[in-house]
Image (cartoon, coloured by chain):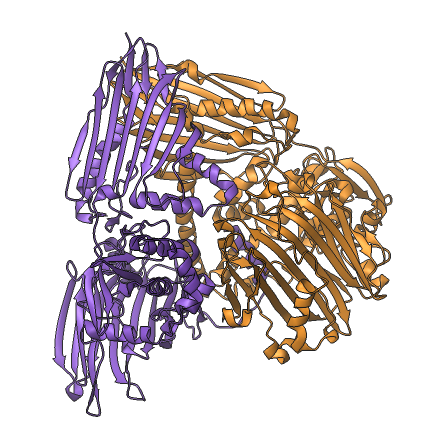
Chain colours: A orange, B purple
């Protein structure tokens, strides 16, 4: 496998410090020179002798530097790795990277852009070092350099560095760099780790260590204009994340972000939580800072005239109803009514599909614009609201806010009952928000006098329960005449958080765009298109639609086969019955028809054995390792998976083994309950699997295993069709 | 779909692009009918080529030393489906160039198409000089049409080895014309034309040239299936065999016979310096205190297998000329030619007579009777020992000396022999040479099946498993064995795994372990049903929609025996019927033997010919269905 360096970046050396032709030598000096660490270390601890590889030293360096009108950012990585098996040798035997720096081309390298310097050496067990001559041993095609490492064997140490320097002109007065958020643990165990940040003045740093990761320290580097921050760690076990786990919440990790601001005043305008003074490493964000940042960013603003007109044309029983309808109208007006045009454009039916919209038409393309427009509308109608500021559950607690991009905002409309709304996708509904915010701590920002946002209060978002988030399948099953397979018809319903992923997978534009035009009485895209082009657009959009549907059907067929652990299902057809796009508790529903051939039914003399449990789909079957789980359990949301199987008993046969289908395991973490009964010529089975919470402490794992095992046993249950 | 949508909304919104004016013209009713007719014939295809013409002409390079070739392919494409989006592409490399890549459509007024040109990436080749030119063609409605014209120039006729009649799309009418000048002697060999309607005409052209035209109709598209024989076996094509040419009265021989091909290969090998000083001490180490000549060869061969990684650079002449042995030795990597040459040089250093050996693997349908650069694709080393030849393939892993992988068995080799050459074939072994045998000794305990298992592997079944095992990370090896032996099923628990030496590639690989099988025993009333077979080999191999021959990786033997003790108080009341089937390609044997206290269930599957032909599919499928009937039937035990 190729080892891509490109995900690691920069380090800063003032460009003026070195002559270009010496650049490669200077970079090499940083990583392998006399001052570099762990140059001679070759031994690894006994406890890691059976690993695939052990990282003796991992050094990450981020450097930010502004010189005159140029901004230089450098991201670099050095790893010294002992390779202990063929898999590790294979893993590190080939490197490829973009934009290689070549000293022979120094003029080209003076120009802005990214350049990449790489060094690789191999240390043999007898201590001899072989530095790879990249120029000689690599090949370059279309800007990509590929290097096969020579003479690399099990037992060798590979010591490499990747130095990516990015030189850009300073354009704005503020620059917000990409945040870095990672656990300290790596794919391989790490003996020594050093993370280093070097910035000159004018750069601000937010940095925080979590879950027991060492703290960052500022180190005197004898330079007034530069500051050096270092975090060091040792003895890090390799990472091995189980299912249902949020590593950043539990494992030692770091998060940081660097900002440049020309001066303190500019810093105030950055969409970031920036320290008052660049000398301070920012670790915490106060409520006051949150208030200050969002007050200016979320001032009500926007041209909501069309929405206002729409609302005034309609009558509502209460404000909650009006706000809900406003949301759906906006979802259509600023989003779904453009979808056909965008498909027309993207699929090259036309290169100018948007010309038919009126001049002021716009697509709301950010959370911020959405919040501003919606709050402006609320003000117009004199409806009170709070801005909700929260954080996704997988990203840690509210108190640990550090990086603005991690903050989620939504609105709590203070109607009775309150209505929560968030920035839309084609299927989001009013009254709900992302499952990752379910029951989390939040801040509510509000304004006392309906002008400036000046209040901040801590609160908690409502949490959904298993009863809100339901997947339900009701199936009717018939045996083939020759007992070689099954013929199935099913209705599938999804509620609450179980809905969104299904809608995204199942619905395509024609399933919901026309629904929206009809609901809101807006002009259809094709009706706007002038005669000349209309027929063409209509015909070609229809062809595109047919093609998408054909591909979708193939995908659903494969998905179903995977659910039943089969190679394929036959004669598949489906039908969308309700899109469920207008309410959290409104179901998304579709029906399916298909045949399963040569599976689930087995001949047993004159009788047949039916693996009827398999009809609820594959269940979690825990491995011995999973049973020994040590970590807490983090899931997206509580939920219920409900199945009804109506099996028509073939004439001349009776059923034995119904008692095998009855399970009743229920505890505080969840449940698996099933019961089977004969009703006339039908065997009716009802099952319910429930995950009661989105989090369980590890102490509850044995309880979870109880119901997971029951469900797995049900999955493996069989009945006998006995010839009478 | 979602990503697609978002991207379009973000990037294209109100972008009043006027890069090209695009007006579409609706396809005519005749074209719609034509598309429907073609679709009826080729129902799995979305696009077809109504008319395809290839015009091939030859010239002499400026320096007079080479023959050049120019191929112009013009295709008329039509959409058979509601909408199609395809890539039009062609490859070229250091020995060729694409001088024309034109697209035109009557259905749209558009002048420019975005033709991209990039390096071709191949997972198996670390670096190669192949490049691809391509453009996206969208067919917004059924019967939409494009015309394309691509001209490719070969700088040296040697590298223009064949011309295939198939494309990614079915072709209704195909015409290939070669204009052969009088100064060029060339043979056009027709391969796999049987079953296709192809006619050939030869007529005189200008300047005493000869015009050879092939006309074909209704050629199905290339298929995308797994485990197929190589394309040289599957598709109709013309093998281009340039013999010689005359320029200004001087005759230059190209590949007139096998000797000419050998001479060219040899000339490349002769350019090697063969400075073996770097590898001398390693050879001395490997052969020290080893009195047996065979042991010396073995030590060197195994060292190369274990220490040289396969990394291929195919760039110009490097695609044909082996790398210096010393380079491969120092770098510890190389391609097949580099490994073959290292094997030769190390053996030569050890005093053996070792030779470079060219051959085509079983992907290639030709032998050296048709001298051409597409005849071979592999290189190994032949060592002469006591009047016998031993063939050493350095790219193999865990290959025992004297055992040959199925991909080279029976293939003709071209072996160095000074000025001359030797043609001989790689020996062919019996199916039982590659065998996997398992015996289960089982009993029923508390509704579970428990017992001991013994597995043994030989030939390729052994080397394949060893190679995979050793390519895993140390910390995952144990998990893999567990996973492999339990068939990846949580219903099967394995424990107490004991293996023979997993570094030994010469003896039979043996694995013993305890097993516990859940959910295979079902009791209803007084009857117990057993779903005993946990392997069900070949059960998923019914070829329902397959279009081309199926190729097993090797001829092999699969043998399994289940011995299960019948618990006290129970007796066997029903077992599936035994079954036997035998054809030239395979034998299938399943038997049940009821004894008083035990039941013995035996399977013996022998794949005698690694290729199952399409013409045999009907029979094969019947046999597999029969096998599945047995697999699906329960063993019945009733209470006495």
In this view, the residue in front, A214 or A592, is: A214
Percent x, y of residue A273: 79, 53
Q: Is residue A7 above or below residue A69?
A: above
In this view, the residue in front, A536 or B207, is: B207
Whether residue A59 can be seen here: yes
Whether residue A322 can be seen here: no
Percent x, y of residue A620: 50, 30
Percent x, y of residue A699: 65, 25
From the viewer's perspective, tell me whether residue B563 is left or right of residue B331. left
Q: Quadrant of residue B275?
A: bottom left
Q: Is residue A711 above or below residue A555?
A: above
For image coordinates 50% across by 66% down, the residue present is: A351
In this view, the residue in front, A645 or B529, is: B529
In this view, the residue in front, B622 or B441, is: B441
Percent x, y of residue A418: 73, 35
Q: Quadrant of residue B442?
A: top left
Q: Quadrant of residue A392?
A: top right
Q: Is residue B477 above or below residue B136?
A: above
Q: Residue furthest bottom?
A: B248
Q: Is residue B171 above or below residue A309?
A: below
From the viewer's perspective, tell me whether residue A47 is left or right of residue A14. left
For image coordinates 68% across by 38% down, the residue present is: A250
Q: Check the picture and name the quadrant holding the C terminus of chain B.
A: top left
Numbered label tally:
0
């Amino acid at each position: 496998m190729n080892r891509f360096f490109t995900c690691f970046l920069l380090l800063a050396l003032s460009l003026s410090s070195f002559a270009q032709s010496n650049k490669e030598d200077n970079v090499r000096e940083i990583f392998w020179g006399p001052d570099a660490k762990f140059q001679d270390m070759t031994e690894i601890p006994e406890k890691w002798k059976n690993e695939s590889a052990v990282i003796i030293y991992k050094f990450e360096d981020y450097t930010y530097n502004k010189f005159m009108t140029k901004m230089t950012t450098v991201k670099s990585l050095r790893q010294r790795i002992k390779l202990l098996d063929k898999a590790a040798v294979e893993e590190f035997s080939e490197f490829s990277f973009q934009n290689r720096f070549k000293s022979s081309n120094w003029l080209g390298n003076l120009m802005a852009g990214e350049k990449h310097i790489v060094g690789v050496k191999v240390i043999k067990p007898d201590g001899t070092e072989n530095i790879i001559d990249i120029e000689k041993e690599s090949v370059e095609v279309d800007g990509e350099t590929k290097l096969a490492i020579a003479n690399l064997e099990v037992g060798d140490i590979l010591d490499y560095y990747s130095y990516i320097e990015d030189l850009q002109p300073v354009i704005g007065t503020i620059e917000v760099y990409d945040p870095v958020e990672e656990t300290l643990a790596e794919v391989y165990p790490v003996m020594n780790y050093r993370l280093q940040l070097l910035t000159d003045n004018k750069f601000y740093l937010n940095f925080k260590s979590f879950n027991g990761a060492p703290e960052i320290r500022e180190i005197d580097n004898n330079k007034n204009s530069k500051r050096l921050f270092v975090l060091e760690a040792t003895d890090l076990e390799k990472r091995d994340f189980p299912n249902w786990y949020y590593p950043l919440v539990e494992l030692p990790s770091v998060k940081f972000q660097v900002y440049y601001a020309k001066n303190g005043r500019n810093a105030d305008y950055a969409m970031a939580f920036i320290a008052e003074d660049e000398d301070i490493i920012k670790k915490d964000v106060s409520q006051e800072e949150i208030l200050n940042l969002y007050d200016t960013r979320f001032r009500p603003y926007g041209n909501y005239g069309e929405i206002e007109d729409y609302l005034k044309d309609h009558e509502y029983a209460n404000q909650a109803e009006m706000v809900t309808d406003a949301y759906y109208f906006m979802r259509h007006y600023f989003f779904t009514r453009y979808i056909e045009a965008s498909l027309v454009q993207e699929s090259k039916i036309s290169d100018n599909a948007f010309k038919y919209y009126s001049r002021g038409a716009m697509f709301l393309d950010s959370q911020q614009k959405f919040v501003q427009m919606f709050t402006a509308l609320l003000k117009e109608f004199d409806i009170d609201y709070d801005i909700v500021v929260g954080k996704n559950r997988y990203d840690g607690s509210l108190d640990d806010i550090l990086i603005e991009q991690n903050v989620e905002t939504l609105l709590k409309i203070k109607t009775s009952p309150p209505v929560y709304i968030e920035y839309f996708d084609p299927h989001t509904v009013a009254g709900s928000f992302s499952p990752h915010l379910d029951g989390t701590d939040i801040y509510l920002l509000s304004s006392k006098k309906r002008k400036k946002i000046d209040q901040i209060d801590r609160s908690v978002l409502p949490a959904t329960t298993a009863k809100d988030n339901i997947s339900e399948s009701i199936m009717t099953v018939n045996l083939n005449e020759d007992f070689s397979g099954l013929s199935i018809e099913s209705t599938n319903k999804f509620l609450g958080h179980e809905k969104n992923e299904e809608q995204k997978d199942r619905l395509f534009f024609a399933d919901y765009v026309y629904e929206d035009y009809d609901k809101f009485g807006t002009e259809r895209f094709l009706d706007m298109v002038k005669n000349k082009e209309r027929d063409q657009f209509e015909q070609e959009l229809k062809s595109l639609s047919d093609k998408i549907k054909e591909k979708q059907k193939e995908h659903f067929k494969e998905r179903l086969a995977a659910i039943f652990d089969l190679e394929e299902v036959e004669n598949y057809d489906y039908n969308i019955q309700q899109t469920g796009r207008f309410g959290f508790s409104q179901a998304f529903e579709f029906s399916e028809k298909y045949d399963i051939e040569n599976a689930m039914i087995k001949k047993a003399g004159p009788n047949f054995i039916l693996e009827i449990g398999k009809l609820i789909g594959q269940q979690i079957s825990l491995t011995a390792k999973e049973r020994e789980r040590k970590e807490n359990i983090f899931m997206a949301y509580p939920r219920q998976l409900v199945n009804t199987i109506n099996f028509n008993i073939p004439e001349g046969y009776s059923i034995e083994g119904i008692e095998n289908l009855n399970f009743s395991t229920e505890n505080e973490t969840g449940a698996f309950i099933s019961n089977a009964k004969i009703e006339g010529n039908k065997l009716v089975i009802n099952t319910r699997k429930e995950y009661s919470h989105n989090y369980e402490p590890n102490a509850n794992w044995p309880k979870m295993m109880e119901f997971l095992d029951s469900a797995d046993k049900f999955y493996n249950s069989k009945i006998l069709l006995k010839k009478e | 779909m979602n990503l697609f949508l978002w991207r379009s909304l973000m990037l294209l919104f109100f972008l009043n692009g006027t890069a090209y004016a695009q007006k579409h013209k609706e396809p005519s009713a005749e074209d719609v009918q034509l598309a429907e007719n073609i679709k009826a014939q080729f129902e799995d295809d979305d696009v077809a080529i109504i008319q395809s013409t290839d015009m091939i002409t030859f010239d002499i390079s400026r320096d007079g030393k080479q023959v050049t070739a120019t191929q112009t392919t013009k295709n008329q494409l039509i959409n058979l489906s509601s909408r199609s989006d395809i890539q039009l592409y062609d490859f070229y490399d250091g020995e060729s160039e694409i001088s024309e890549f034109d697209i035109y459509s009557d259905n749209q007024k558009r002048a420019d198409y975005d033709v991209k040109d990039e390096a071709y990436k191949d997972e198996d080749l670390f670096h190669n000089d192949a490049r691809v030119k391509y453009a996206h063609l969208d067919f917004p409605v059924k019967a939409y049409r494009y015309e394309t014209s691509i001209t490719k120039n070969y700088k040296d006729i040697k590298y223009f080895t064949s011309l295939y009649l198939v494309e990614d799309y079915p072709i209704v009418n195909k015409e290939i014309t070669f204009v052969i000048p009088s100064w060029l002697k060339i043979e056009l060999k027709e391969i796999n034309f049987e079953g296709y309607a192809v006619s050939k005409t030869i007529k005189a052209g200008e300047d005493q040239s000869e015009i050879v035209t092939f006309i074909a109709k209704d050629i199905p598209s290339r298929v995308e299936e797994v485990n197929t024989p190589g394309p040289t076996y599957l598709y109709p094509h013309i093998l281009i065999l340039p013999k010689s040419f005359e320029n200004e009265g001087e005759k230059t021989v190209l590949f007139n016979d096998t000797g000419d091909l050998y001479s060219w290969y040899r000339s490349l090998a002769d350019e090697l310096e063969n400075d073996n000083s770097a590898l001398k001490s390693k050879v001395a180490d490997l052969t020290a205190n080893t009195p047996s000549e065979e042991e010396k060869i073995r030590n060197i061969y195994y060292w190369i297998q274990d220490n040289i990684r396969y990394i291929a650079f195919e760039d110009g002449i490097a695609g044909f000329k082996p790398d210096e042995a010393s380079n491969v030795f120092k770098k510890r990597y190389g391609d097949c030619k580099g490994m073959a040459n290292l094997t030769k040089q190390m053996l030569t250093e050890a005093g053996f007579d070792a030779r470079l050996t060219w051959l085509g693997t079983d992907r290639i349908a030709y032998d050296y009777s048709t001298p051409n650069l597409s005849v071979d694709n592999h290189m190994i080393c032949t060592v002469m020992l006591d009047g016998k030849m031993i063939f050493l393939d350095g790219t193999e892993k865990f290959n025992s000396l004297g055992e040959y992988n199925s991909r080279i068995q029976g293939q003709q080799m071209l072996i160095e022999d000074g000025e001359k050459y030797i043609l001989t074939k790689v020996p062919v072994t019996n199916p039982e040479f590659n065998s996997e045998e398992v015996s289960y000794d089982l009993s029923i305990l508390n509704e579970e099946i428990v017992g001991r298992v013994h597995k043994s592997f030989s030939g390729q079944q052994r080397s394949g498993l060893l190679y995979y095992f050793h390519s895993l990370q140390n910390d995952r090896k144990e998990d893999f064995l567990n996973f492999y032996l339990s068939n990846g099923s949580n219903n099967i628990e394995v424990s107490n795994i004991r293996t023979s030496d997993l570094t030994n590639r010469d003896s039979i690989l043996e694995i013993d372990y305890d097993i516990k099988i859940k959910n295979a025993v079902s009791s209803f009333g007084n009857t117990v049903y057993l779903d005993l077979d946990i392997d069900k080999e070949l059960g998923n191999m019914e070829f329902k929609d397959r279009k081309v021959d199926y190729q097993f990786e090797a001829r092999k033997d699969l043998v399994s025996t289940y011995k299960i003790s019948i618990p006290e108080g129970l007796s066997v009341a029903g077992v599936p019927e035994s079954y036997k089937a035998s054809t030239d390609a395979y034998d299938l044997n399943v038997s049940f033997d009821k004894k008083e206290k035990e039941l013995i269930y035996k399977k013996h599957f022998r794949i005698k010919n690694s290729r199952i032909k399409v013409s045999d599919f009907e029979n094969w499928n019947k046999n597999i269905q029969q096998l599945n009937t047995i697999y699906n039937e329960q063993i019945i035990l009733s209470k006495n």
